[in-house]
């Protein structure tokens, strides 16, 4: 019987390398592909914490050779720039705080890649995400579940995957701990067994987000006033892209007590600051909802919600609204509920769905 073909997205790191090994061990016909996501002049940094560097490509190629599987480099620069880098820049220009990894998963890794490899006879895409995907007979739908290793769980960034995308997706390492994955890589003799994890924002290898945005937004006047809740002008700033909700450092004003960003006006570019207590919200509106566990929401539902990647799940009630939006009412007020970040809803370890905080 002909083997089903699986394309493994190989970044050159230990997780995707072991993913390829596990898929091959499971008896599939495996092809390794590294996505070239950003321009060559930006890929020359050989730091182990960058993504898409020449070192990463060679590491992936080396692993593929050791596993005796075909290997290719796929250029998705155009899609990555449009859906990830441009999105990232424009969100900050609008006073929101984006999450580029979610966009990269939805638009590049599980959409652009699939369009390219499906004609090759691929049945599945496998990635090195720490999460699990399964068909739930109760709901009659595919769902994402948290990884066995809670410290590495990436289910939060996968809420945007559709039923079609989940139907052709595998997360082979989701049932393992990171320690087990490194041990497996060492056992297989893979040279990446002790390679450091890559940073979250792969296209800013020097970690200077403000410098990246300043260059990308050059020529756009995003300066404005710094005002308190009563409307008193306390100073000015050179660009709203430098700030996020809850930020305390770098405000450049002295109120005689700690000050925090509590609101960013996208039209006027005003920065509203207040006290620590002003950072807490009892509710928020979440838009562009993608439900995984069911088709749509018609009645209020009790959930646990994460409002940031590292945020602990907190109880809340989700109320359906118009225009594919919901109102989230937290059991307890939450700090720094930030426009542009994802709100992801859980039932235990299962992702129900999620959307974007307005």
Image (spheres, rainbow, N blue to C red):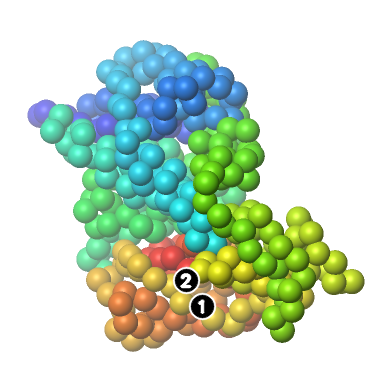
Residue 218: quarter of image: top right
Q: Is residue 230 above or below residue 79?
A: below
Residue 358 circle label: 2
Q: How many marks can you see?
A: 2
Crowding near the residue tagged with mark 2, few <14, some 14–19, many ≥20 C-alpha atoms within 10 Å: some
Q: Is residue 200 visible?
A: no
Q: Residue at x 22, y 66 (%)?
A: 140
Question: Residue 215 placed where, x, y %?
Answer: 56, 40
Q: Is residue 248 above or below residue 183?
A: below
Residue 153 lies left or right of residue 63; in this view the side is: right
Q: Earlier in the sequence, mark 2 or mark 1?
A: 1
Q: How much space separates mark 2 and mark 1, taking CA atoms?
A: 7 Å
SS under mark 2: loop
Residue 159 lies left or right of residue 214; in this view the side is: left
Residue 214: quarter of image: top right
Q: Residue at x 51, y 78 (%)?
A: 284
Given residues 55 and 182, the one toward you in this image is 55
Specify the quadrant that holds the N terminus: top left
Residue 216 lies left or right of residue 21; in this view the side is: right
SS under mark 1: strand
Question: Residue 226 placed where, x, y %?
Answer: 70, 68
Which residue ends up furthest to the left in the rendered image?
Answer: 1
Crowding near the residue tagged with mark 1, few <14, some 14–19, many ≥20 C-alpha atoms within 10 Å: some
Mark nearest the camera among 2 and 1 is 2
Question: Residue 127 placed where, x, y %?
Answer: 37, 38
Given residues 107 and 18, the one toward you in this image is 107
The answer to whether the residue labelled 2 contacts the one labelled 1, judged by CB atoms less than 8 Å apart, is: yes
Given residues 37 and 11, the one toward you in this image is 37
Mark 1, residue position: 284
């Amino acid at each position: 019987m002909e083997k089903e073909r699986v394309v493994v997205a190989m970044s050159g790191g230990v997780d995707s390398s072991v993913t390829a090994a596990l898929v091959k061990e499971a008896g599939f016909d495996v092809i390794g592909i590294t996505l070239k996501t950003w321009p060559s002049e930006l890929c020359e940094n050989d730091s182990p914490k960058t993504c898409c560097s020449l070192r990463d490509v060679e590491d992936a190629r080396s692993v593929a050779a050791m596993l005796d599987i075909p290997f290719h480099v796929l250029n998705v620069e155009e899609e990555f720039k449009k859906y990830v880098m441009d999105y990232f820049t424009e969100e900050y220009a609008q006073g929101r705080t984006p999450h580029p990894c979610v966009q990269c998963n939805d638009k590049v890794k599980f959409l652009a890649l699939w369009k390219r490899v499906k004609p090759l006879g691929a049945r599945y895409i496998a990635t090195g995400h720490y999460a699990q995907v399964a068909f739930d007979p109760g709901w009659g739908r595919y769902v994402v579940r948290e990884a066995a290793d809670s410290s590495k769980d990436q289910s939060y960034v996968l809420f945007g995957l559709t039923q079609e995308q989940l139907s052709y997706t595998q997360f082979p390492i989701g049932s393992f701990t990171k320690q087990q994955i490194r041990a497996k890589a060492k056992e297989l003799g893979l040279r990446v067994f002790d390679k450091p994890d890559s940073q979250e924002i792969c296209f800013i290898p020097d970690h200077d987000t403000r410098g990246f945005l300043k260059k990308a937004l050059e020529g756009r006047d995003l300066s404005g006033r710094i005002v308190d809740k009563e409307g008193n002008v306390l100073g000015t700033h050179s660009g709203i892209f430098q700030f996020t909700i809850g930020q305390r450092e770098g405000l450049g004003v002295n109120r005689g007590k700690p000050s925090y960003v509590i609101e960013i006006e996208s039209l006027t570019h005003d920065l509203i600051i207040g006290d620590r207590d002003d950072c807490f919200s009892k509710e928020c509106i979440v838009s562009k909802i993608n439900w995984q566990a069911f088709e749509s929401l018609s009645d209020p539902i009790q959930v646990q919600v994460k409002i940031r990647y590292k945020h602990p799940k907190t109880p809340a009630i989700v109320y359906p609204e118009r225009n594919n939006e919901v109102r989230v009412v937290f059991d307890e007020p939450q700090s720094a509920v930030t426009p542009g970040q994802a709100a992801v809803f859980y039932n235990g370890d299962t992702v129900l769905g999620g959307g974007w905080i307005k």
